[in-house]
Each structure stands twice: as structure tokens, then as C-alpha cells.
Amino acid sequence: MGEGVTRSFRPEELERLAGLMDDLNRSADEVLKRAWPLQVSQFVTPLGEMPRWGSETAKDLRQRAAIGRLQTGDPFAGLVWAGFPPLEIVANGNKIDPATLISVNSVADWANATGNSDFQRKPGESLDDYLKRLEAAAISKAIPALTPHEATVANILKIVGDVKGVAATAPIVTTQAVSLSRLLLNNHVSRPLIGKLTGGAWTLPTRSATAPGPGAASLTRRLFMKSSLYRDYVSMLPEYAEMDQVNRAVNAGRTLAGARVNNLLNVAFGNNELAAVLGGTTHSRETVTASSQANLLKVWSATADPKKMEAAAAVLKVEPTALTRLGTVARTAGAVRSLGIVGGVVSTGYSAANVISQGDPIAAFKRNGAGYVADIAEVGFNASLTAAMICPNPLTLGATVVTGAVYVGAKVVENWDDIEAGAKKACKAIGDGAEKVFSSINPFD
């Protein structure tokens, strides 16, 4: 090979060759096993060194392939270099966070450059033990260079950011879509129909939207769901009927609890009595009975009325002069909802700045396509979710569902190649692992 000539390779081809070496190992083992009963072992004895040579060669090929993948920013290349098979990496996904991937890839990059093999996987070493060994080495400065590979860091941060965004958005979209559909079905279909069929003798109660986020009743239901009796029987009720019973249980519990517990719940989830005094009516023209139903803009408007503030002071058992308008609104909403609103405002501003920073919309769409659509949808989702927490009604909740669904869909389209490749890798790893397991326990194989 002449000077100045470099040779490139495809990591997947080296991995395929390593797989062929594994097949060669199995074939050599099979030959040795069958030679013994046929009394021809002396003719195949030279093949006895082949399994060990094949294993070492396959391991070396996989490490070389991993180094090649490392240079392209593959986040799992370091673990493959260390000697962990794909099946084991998939099975231990809960232990692999972004910082860990960065550290392992950095170690692999440094070890390849220095020829150090101390931080490869030891025989029989679990992934958990290996990660602890790396952590101990980092603390003791045994690894002099833990500078993450630039491509790896960029790829990991992008993947993690998108995954976290979708993981946070999808449950909200699903929950609010179900709640909104049930609300509209109850108020505009089931309630009028039953009233008409019974001649007005019996009808369903009118429902009102509630602000997104956890409440005392929803958290109590999660506790109830830990009971097998509740899961098997009570949770089989229609959603509204079940939650009505949970609310009754919560209210009954609060009447038995002391003032300190009730004050704590009021601070966390909002004061229902205060909401009833200041909230007026909901979007469905029903009297506000829970803080989560209250339109905070109406509450703010009500705090401008001295008589309303006197009523609020009576609920809180303080002098009217001790109350401020903003503080009264915050007490009505509760800490959880208030923090959600503040976080929503910040997120909306941040996502809007991200869109603005990309410049001309047409040029940005041409550059990033689905990614730019996702960025715009993210602005809409954060803004609509914030609006729904301030003013819970079908319009704001519907906007949250639509923009959130667009965001999730656009992110899937943007990362489809990575998702498809990852799914293929996981399926192949699981398939290969299952094949080896069944082969090892099959006496006729």
C-alpha cells in the first residue's frame, strides 16, 4: 500500500465478519464433538485452537467496529467496545443515562488512542459492576482524559432532548384528549339524550373542565389503584362515576383530618372555598366548587371588588387589609398550579425564542423540515397548556391536545430514521439472543 493512502471501512461489515467468526467457533466445536464417537479425533485435533482464535478475533473485530462507530457519534459504541453485546445493552437500558454514555464513549476513545485495555469488560463482569468500576476510576483520576467525544455529546443531547420532550408531552395529550372527549360527550350528547328519554325525570350532572395537573383526588386515586380490590371492582365504574366517589372519599377524609392537614392541602392544591367565593361560574355555567375549575382571570377580576375580598378574608380568617390581589389568586390556585403556570410561561418564552432565532420561516423549514414544524408546535403547546392552567375550558384544552399531537408527530417524523434503526437493532439483538438461548437448551440442535 503506497504512502498517503488511507483505507476506510464500514463498521457493520466488521460486525458481520465477527459474526462469521462466531459461526466458525460453533462449527469447530461441533466437529470436535462429532469426531469423538467416530474415533477420528486425531485427525481434527489441530482444529482445537480454532475456537479460542475465533473468539479473540471476533472480539477484536467488534472493538474495531465500535471505534469506527464512535467516530460517527453512535452513543452506544463505547459499551460495544468494552465488550457488551447488544442484547445486554438493551436489557440494561434503565442503567444507561446520557452522562454514562458520554463517559463510556470517552473512555473508549482515550483507550483506543493510548492502547490502554484496562477498561475493557472483565470476564463475567456485569454492566452495573463495569459502570461502577469506571466511576471509581474517574474519581481516583485513573483515567487522565475524560473529555467527551464532540459528535457523541451532540448526538446524545439531541436524542435525550427529543425523547424527554415527547415523553413529557404525550401523556398530557392523551390524558387531556380523553378528558375533553368525555366532557363534551357528557354535556352535549349523553346529558340531553337521557333527559329527553326520561322526560326530564332524571339526567346526568353537567361537567366542567379542570386545569391540567395533579390534584388531591387524582393523587388519591393513584393510591387506591395499588389495591387489587379497587382495581378489580371500583375502577370498573365509568370514569366520572369513579372520580365522583374518589372526590367524596377525599372530602370525607378532609372533614376527619385536622386543620393543619387541610391547610397544607389548601396550600398545595388550592382553596376550594376561596374558589367558590371568587370563581363565579365555569365555562359550562356551573358554580365553581373546586379550585381546579376556577378561571383565574375571573378570580383576579373578583379581587378588585371589596365585598369579594371581604368574603375571601372571612374564608381565610384574616383581615381584608392583610390580603393582596395576586396573593389571593395564588391561594385560590394552589402552589402546584401556580408553579405550573410560571413554568409554562418560561417554557413558552424559551420555545418562542428558539423559533425566532432560526430566522426566516421559509428558509428554516427548508433546512429542518419536520424539526421546524415541531419547534413551532412546541410554542403552541406550551402556550395553550399555560392558558389551560389559567382558564380551563374546552377551547384551551382542545388547543393543548392539537398542538401537542402535532409536536409529537413532527418529532417522530424528524427522528424516524433513528427510531427505525434503533428498533431494528433492538429486534436483531433480542432475536439473536433468543436464538442462542434456544440453541443452548435444545438437545437436538
Image (spheres, rainbow, N blue to C red):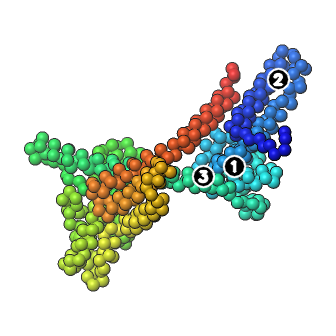
Return the x and y of residue 243 as percentages of the image width and height.
Answer: 30, 52
- Quadrant where the N terminus lies? top right
Report which residue position mark 1 lands on. 71
Return the x and y of residue 29 as percentages of the image width and height.
Answer: 79, 26
Which secondary structure lies at badge 2? Answer: helix
Return the x and y of residue 157 as percentages of the image width and height.
Answer: 58, 55
Report which residue position mark 3 lands on. 155
Q: Residue furthest left?
A: 199
Label 3: how many residues lie within 10 Å, few (<14), some (14-19) or many (20+)?
some
Front one among 9 and 143: 9
Q: Is residue 305 above or below residue 146?
A: below
Residue 262 lies left or right of residue 314; in this view the side is right
Report the mark closest to the observer, 1 or 2: 1
In the image, what residue occupies the spot 26% across and 70% down? 299
- Quadrant in the rendering for residue 377: bottom left
Q: Earlier in the sequence, mark 3 or mark 2?
A: 2
Inspect the image, locate mark 1, and give the three-letter code of the amino acid beneath it. Answer: Gln
Report the mark closest to the observer, 3 or 2: 3
Q: Earlier in the sequence, mark 1 or mark 2?
A: 2
In the image, what residue occupies the spot 84% across and 44% down? 3
Return the x and y of residue 184 as percentages of the image width and height.
Answer: 24, 48
Front one among 212 and 197: 212
Which secondary structure lies at badge 1? Answer: loop
> Which mark identifies residue 32?
2
Q: Is residue 228 above or below residue 361?
A: above
